[in-house]
Image (tube, grey):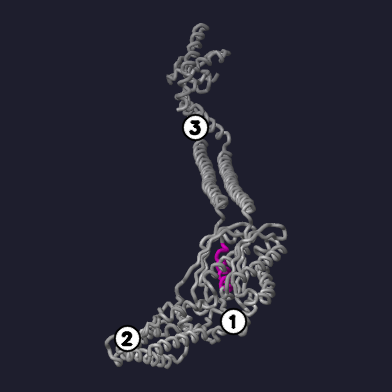
């Protein structure tokens, strides 16, 4: 550039660019070639000075406008100075905290520059800025074979940073592409060495670690300068073709648990209930025991007390007790006195029924002698039968009450 | 005078042209050879700025970085004649620039072509000597190490490149086989699901039966205990009764009978058929109570 500007020599440079297929920077590097640049510049200036100054003098100020030779020379100096300054200014660049610059001096690696304001001679040095802290990530998802010849669907994310910017820039063509290939290979390798069950369940963690180790090893083998920070197994599942069958297994597992819980809840209901029942039986038996014993004691006591008195006056007491009891018994019941010797007692049974079913509660016949002729007996019997039939339904109902 | 100026300009141009033709830069990422009329005179030029004789020497530069050869997926057969779709990639770099230039005239595509045929051949050999399971899981590393070793021997000598790595990406069953794999996986899952459900029922039935057993046992034990208690009570009561009543057993039967009468005829509308000659009625027809 510096050379182009003064004399419009850019015209002369185009053919070089066209003629030489080498890249632009290399070309310029050639021009800038010699290390002692200042000297070269000075020579060039001298030559240009001769050239322009000479022509200026010869043409009588025609070439450089109306300025005299001295003025033209000064103008060229100014142009050159500006050009040099511009060239120098172009050499400044900043490297961010996240970045490192890989510097090639005339194509050869010279240094890796740190963050801050940096200066390298432009066109001689070529700087590639590489972000070394940004975490890049690579996603990969695919169906793959497992060790037990099943097929699983695994999605993985590899996160990585550029740990060695020099290697990243210089030693591998397309390091990110290499990572992508290597990640797929590493993932499939590890998955292919694992059983499906472990991939889908508790083996994910190990899977991620193994993929990371393997991937890191590949990256180091290729000298990509990439450092794998993390590998996450985002998703590991059965392929969609069999997903429903896998889901059904999960459902079955839940069903198993559910049925067990139901049975457990049944057991939890039944056993305590039985325990309660058993407790009740025991309590009732205890109560019975206490009851009969107490009753026995009470009755014994009563008997003993009575016996004491009885022994004092046996006949009177005996008589009294008998009469008391009979009175009580007879007072409560209907009575039929039969003053017939050898009478057929069976004949009187319908009378009992009549009395009973009349429900009158009143002793129907209390007279001393009751005699029934055959006819009245028959009519009574019929009445009884009717009554019974009529009232049977109601009696049953009442009977239940 | 203007001709002199013109001449100067042309001279300057020529000098610059010659100078530019006599220097060249080999970048850090490149490997280069210097040819003199087609003959290699400098086989491995260091990175940086170097000189050459214009129009006599020509420089050929090649990419010196690690390159990737990603071959197309191929179908390979394993030893059990199972067909596998295999997708591999190869990492290589120029080892000897001279050999490389000689073998490929520096054409990367040509090199890749040659390599790819060899890789495919090697992989085919290795896969053909192993079972599916071995190539998928067990011996993947061994297969690759073997392929790399054998390739390296040839590639280094014939192509001037070194094989850094050969890796298999995809190893897949062809689609029609995949479908039967899916079918198998499905039936396996179905089996597992059924097993789980049945096991659930089994356990549940066990739990229920156990509960029922506990219930029966509890009730039976309680029955045993309670009968024991009742028996105890009965025994104690019997002893107490016997103790009391044996003092006068005749009187006991008397009072007990009276009590029984009271309770038996407790007024439920019983009808008593009585003969007036009973003990109770002894005064009913005869105030003297004469004995019959």
Region in magenta: A202-218
Say which residue label 1 marks.
Answer: B33
Q: Residues within 10 Å of mark 2 (few under 14, many from 20)?
A: some
The C terminus of chain A, quarter of image? top left
Q: Is residue A115 magenta?
A: no
Say which residue label 2 marks.
Answer: A63
Q: Does the magenta stretch include residue A212?
A: yes
The residue that appears at 66% across and 68% down in the rendered structure is: B119
Q: In this view, which residue lies farthest toward the left?
A: A66
Residue B78 percent coordinates (x, y): 70, 60
Q: Distance between the residues labelled 3 and 1?
A: 153 Å
Q: Residues within 10 Å of mark 3 (few under 14, many from 20)?
A: some
Residue B11 percent coordinates (x, y): 45, 88
Asked if one can make out residue B7 in the rendered structure from this viewpoint, the answer is yes
Residue B285 percent coordinates (x, y): 48, 16
Q: In this view, which residue lies farthest toward the top?
A: A375
Describe the element under mark 1 as helix, strand or loop.
strand
Say which residue label 3 marks.
Answer: A317
Q: Mark 3 lies on which chain?
A: A
The residue that appears at 55% across and 18% down in the rendered structure is: B292
Instruction: Determine whether, in the image, residue A206 is placed left or right of residue A131.
Output: right
* In the foreground, A155 or A250: A155
* In the rendered image, the vertical position of residue A331 relative to residue A197, given as above or below: above
Q: How crowded is mark 1: few (under 14 residues within 10 Å), some or many (20 or more)?
A: many
Q: Mark 2 lies on which chain?
A: A
Describe the element under mark 2 as helix, strand or loop.
loop
């Amino acid at each position: 550039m510096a050379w182009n500007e003064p004399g419009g020599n850019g015209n002369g440079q185009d053919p070089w660019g066209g003629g030489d297929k080498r890249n632009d920077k290399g070309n310029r590097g050639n021009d800038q070639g010699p290390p002692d640049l200042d000297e070269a510049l000075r020579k060039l200036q001298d030559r240009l000075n001769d050239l322009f100054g000479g022509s200026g003098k010869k043409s009588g100020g025609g070439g450089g406008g109306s300025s005299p030779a001295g003025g033209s020379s000064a103008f060229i100096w100014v142009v050159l100075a500006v050009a040099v300054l511009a060239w120098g200014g172009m050499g400044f660049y900043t490297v961010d905290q996240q970045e490192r610059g890989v510097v090639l001096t005339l194509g050869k690696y010279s240094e890796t520059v740190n963050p801050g304001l940096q200066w390298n001679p432009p066109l001689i040095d070529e700087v590639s800025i590489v972000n070394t802290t940004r975490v890049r990530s690579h996603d990969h998802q695919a169906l793959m074979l497992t060790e037990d010849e099943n097929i699983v669907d695994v999605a993985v994310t590899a996160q990585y940073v550029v740990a060695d910017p020099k290697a990243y820039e210089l030693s591998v063509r397309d390091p990110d592409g290499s990572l992508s290939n290597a990640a797929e290979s590493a993932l499939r390798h590890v998955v292919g060495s694992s059983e499906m069950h472990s991939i889908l369940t508790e083996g994910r963690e190990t899977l991620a670690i193994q993929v990371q180790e393997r991937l890191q090893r590949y990256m180091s083998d290729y000298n990509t300068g990439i450092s794998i920070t993390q590998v996450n197994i985002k998703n590991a599942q059965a392929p969609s073709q069999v997903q429903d069958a896998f889901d059904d297994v999960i459902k079955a597992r839940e069903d198993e648990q559910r049925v067990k819980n139901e049975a457990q809840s049944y057991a939890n209901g039944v056993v305590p209930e039985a325990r309660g029942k058993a407790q009740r039986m025991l309590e009732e038996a205890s109560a019975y025991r206490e009851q009969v014993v107490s009753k026995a004691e009470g009755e014994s006591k009563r008997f003993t007390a009575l016996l004491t008195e009885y022994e004092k006056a046996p006949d009177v007491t005996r008589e009294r007790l008998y009469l008391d009891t009979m009175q009580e018994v007879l007072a409560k019941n209907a009575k039929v006195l039969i003053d017939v010797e050898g009478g057929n007692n069976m004949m009187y049974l319908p009378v009992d029924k009549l009395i009973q079913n009349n429900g009158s509660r009143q002793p129907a016949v209390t007279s001393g002698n009751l005699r029934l002729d055959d006819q009245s007996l028959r009519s009574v019997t019929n009445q009884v039968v009717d009554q019974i039939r009529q009232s049977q339904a109601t009696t049953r109902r009442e009977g239940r009450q | 005078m203007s001709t002199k100026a013109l001449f100067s300009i042309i001279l300057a141009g020529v000098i610059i042209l010659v100078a530019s033709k006599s220097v060249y830069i080999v970048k850090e990422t490149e490997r280069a050879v210097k040819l003199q009329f087609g003959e290699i005179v400098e086989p491995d030029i260091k990175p940086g700025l170097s000189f050459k004789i214009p129009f006599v020497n020509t420089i050929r530069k090649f990419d010196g970085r690690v390159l990737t050869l990603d071959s197309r997926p191929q179908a390979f057969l394993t030893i059990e004649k199972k067909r596998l779709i295999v997708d591999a990639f190869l990492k290589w770099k120029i080892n000897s620039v001279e050999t490389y230039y000689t073998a490929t005239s520096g054409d990367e595509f040509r090199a890749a072509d040659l390599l790819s045929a060899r890789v495919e051949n090697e992989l085919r050999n290795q896969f053909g000597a192993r079972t599916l399971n071995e190539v998928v899981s067990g011996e993947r590393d061994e297969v690759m190490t073997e392929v790399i070793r054998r390739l390296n021997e040839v590639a280094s000598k014939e192509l001037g490149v070194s094989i850094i790595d050969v890796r298999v990406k995809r190893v897949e069953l062809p689609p029609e086989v995949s479908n039967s794999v899916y079918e198998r996986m499905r039936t396996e899952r179905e089996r597992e699901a059924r097993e789980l459900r049945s096991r659930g029922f089994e356990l549940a039935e066990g739990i229920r039966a156990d509960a029922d057993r506990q219930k029966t046992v509890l009730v039976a034990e309680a029955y045993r205990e309670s009968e024991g208690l009742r028996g105890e009570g009965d025994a104690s009561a019997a002893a107490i009764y016997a103790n009391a009543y044996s003092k006068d057993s005749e009187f006991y039967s008397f009072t007990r009978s009276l009590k029984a009468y009271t309770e038996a005829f407790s007024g439920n509308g019983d009808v008593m058929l009585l003969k007036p000659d009973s003990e109770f009625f002894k005064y009913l027809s005869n105030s003297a109570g004469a004995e019959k």
